[in-house]
Image (cartoon, rainbow, N blue to C red):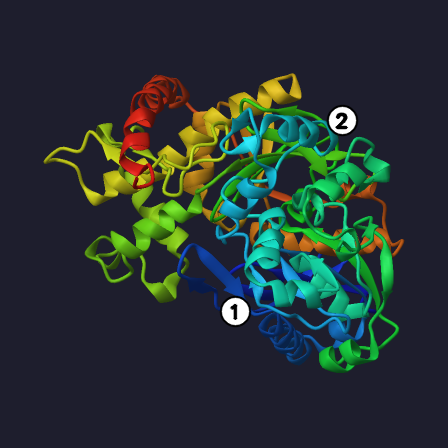
Amino acid sequence: MAIPPQILAIDLGTSGMKAALVAADGTVTGWAERPVPLVVLPGGGAEQDPVAWWDALAEVVADLGRAFPDHLRAVTTVCSSTQGEGTIAVDAAGEPLTRCISWLDMRGATHLRRQFGGFPAVDGISVRRIARWLRLTGGMPSVTGKDPAAHMLLIRDDMPDVYARTKTFLNVLDWINLKLTGRTVATVDSILTSWVTDNRRAPAIRYAPALVAASGIDADKFPPIVACTEVIGTLSPQAADHLGLPRSVRVVAGAIDNTAAAIGAGTIRDNEPHLYLGTSSWIAAHVPRKKTDIRTGIASIPCAIPDRYLMTALQATAGANLTWLRDKIVEYDDPIVSAGHVSRDEGTIFDAFDKIIPMVPPGANGVLYTPWLYGERAPVDDPNLRAAFLNISLDTTRSDLLRAVFEGVALNTRWLAGAVDRFLGAPVESMVITGGAARSDSWCQIFADVLGHEIRRDANPVTVNARGAGWIGAVGAGMIAFDDIPALSRNDHVFTPGPDHARYGEIYDIYQELHHRLAPVYRRLNRPAG
């Protein structure tokens, strides 16, 4: 049987470089990955080496070629999904002048306040400027300094020699596309967090001259903007040689990770949400209009579908709570795992957890957990919040703590879902769940019970970003249309609410009260010294 044309889908996250071979019908063949280290610096710095990304890409493509040589030979298109909010200064030859300043990097916060301060102000940012950002872009720079608006100012002020040599500032996706094609562009979603675009007309995202002038960055250092589905060229000779692919392979611009996941989840129709469950989590849905809810921090932003926006409501930590619990409390060699549950060779950590969770009743024997390990983004933007176990007694077991963590993330998601319902104008009755942590049957069922509606699980949740990049590439190459994607999407199970929903309703009332009572305590505990 002839192998259909393949899209080489690049999936570059903070943990490393991944790639897959994706057909236009969404079939994912092959998966390869390489870790790329994150360099943590004093003063809130976090960087990655772009050259290490590029080298890792060659390695994962070579892995795919060894495992699936016929599929790799069938590649006609390359399309990427990457982490967002990174900043790379490149020179006139396209070479990086610095490591990538990561979305985790907070060193630009003081520069941001200095550039955009004024009276009256909120968190050091001029109210007048905030109003203009909200009107034109739908959002505003993070006061933590974790996006390109602050990164570029950090380079301008602390690295003036680098700034003088900078031809263009690029986000992560933009730099990968430059390496693939030799062309310098930004996509409508990758440029968003530079906060210099007029996003009021989805099909015509463009720079806002007033925002560019106020940004403190020379206008010619911003790249041209293209749609996510635009074919931006073919592989450059250097890229073709580096990847072992023909120079005729097309490159579609692609998208940042949350944009690609919304496509990969198959949730193309208006107001059709999905829940991405990974290290962090979010509820997202395509919507027809630009809208911002200032109170809850939820906004609709430019996305891969040219005439639509993507509503995104972000929960700061979800699966990260399990990673913390696994590494610090219930490790693989812990008796709770090794005593008859599951070993490392018998499955994933989710298989282990799924054997433990059903042994604990809903409500975790009275233990509650708040999953705010890294503060929270929505429905409250509060960096001071922290995680906590409550109501522990002498009878509490580690299995109770595990179930409480699963339930705490779901309860927080219910809190977030209420704000999403208000944003969309109607209660959500069904939701796709995707992302690596969706592999847990127990967690999916807890989400159904806590949220009170059906949860439809993506049949291959681990590859959602790569599949999304593959479908964006297929649309850009003319293989399919976005409207074809719902029929191509596959779910492997539908989880429906059970009798535990009423019990979780009582627990949720207590959970909301905990935030009300604990938020002032966390502000006192975690406020900066001095």
Residue in the picture at 33% in, 47% down: 355
Residue 303, can we see it?
Answer: no
User: How far across and how far down the image is residue 446, in percent?
Assistant: 42, 33
- Neighbourhood count class around disc 2 (C-alpha, 10 Å): few under 14, some 14–19, many 20 upward: some
Of 34 and 397, the residue lying toward us: 34
Residue in the picture at 71% in, 55% down: 469
Residue in the picture at 85% in, 60% down: 232
Of 413 and 300, the residue lying toward us: 300
Of 172 and 414, the residue lying toward us: 172
Q: Is residue 427 above or below residue 223?
A: above
Residue in the picture at 80% in, 62% down: 184
In the rendered view, does 338 fall on the left or right side of 157?
A: left
Residue type highlighted by circle 1: Val
Q: Please tell me the numbered disc located at residue 289.
A: 2
Q: Quadrant of the C terminus?
A: top left
- Name the element at disc 2: loop
Q: Is residue 186 above or below residue 128?
A: below
